[in-house]
Image (cartoon, grey):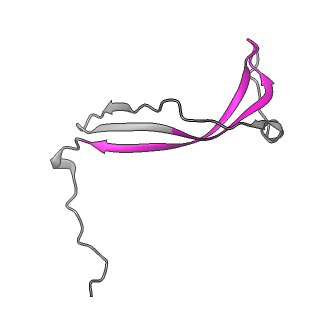
Amino acid sequence: MGEMQITPQDIAEGESLDFTEHTEHWNTYKLSDGTLLKVRIVLTGVKRLKKYNPDGEPIYIIQSQNIVRAVDVPTDIKMKPKPPTTPTH
């Protein structure tokens, strides 16, 4: 069974939907250098296409932004802060 292709025309003909935030969770990842990375996806737009999965559910295309925060960064891998470049009067 072949993979379904979505064309630019499919996207153009899709219906833009309004949405409200229900929940947005942070995913956390422990990196091999000891840093804890927190990642969250934030939905910025959504369209329902006029195409359907084999089980009959409509296909949605989303626009999103990834929010990434590094926390608990080990001090031995941090760079020293640079001095400010804003001129003072």
Give the side of residue 48 with respect to residue 69, left or right: right
Give the side of residue 46 with respect to residue 56, left or right: left
Please report the residue visible at 81 percent of the width from the left and 42 percent of the height from the top.
12
Question: What type of secondary structure mainly makes up the magenta span?
Answer: strand
Horizontal and vertical percent position of residue 58 = 74, 22
Q: Which residues are magenta?
A: 42-71
**Number of dots carrying numbers:** 0
Horizontal and vertical percent position of residue 48 = 74, 31
Above or below: residue 24 compared with residue 75: above
Q: Residue furthest bottom?
A: 89
Horizontal and vertical percent position of residue 29 = 34, 31
Please report the residue visible at 21 percent of the width from the left and 52 percent of the height from the top.
78
Task: Tell me if residue 75 is in the magenta stretch.
Answer: no
Please report the residue visible at 69 percent of the width from the left and 30 percent of the height from the top.
60
Horizontal and vertical percent position of residue 20 = 59, 35
Give the side of residue 68 with respect to residue 64, left or right: left
Above or below: residue 76 compared with residue 28: below
Quadrant for residue 3, please give it: top right
Above or below: residue 48 compared with residue 74: above
Q: Residue furthest left?
A: 76
Instruction: Give 82 or 62, whichever is nearer the viewer.
Output: 62
Question: Which quadrant is the N terminus positioned in?
Answer: top right
Please report the residue visible at 76 percent of the width from the left and 14 percent of the height from the top.
56
Quadrant for residue 27, please give it: top left
Instruction: Give 29 or 24, whichever is nearer the viewer.
Output: 24
Task: Tell me if residue 45 is in the magenta stretch.
Answer: yes
Question: Which quadrant is the C terminus positioned in?
Answer: bottom left
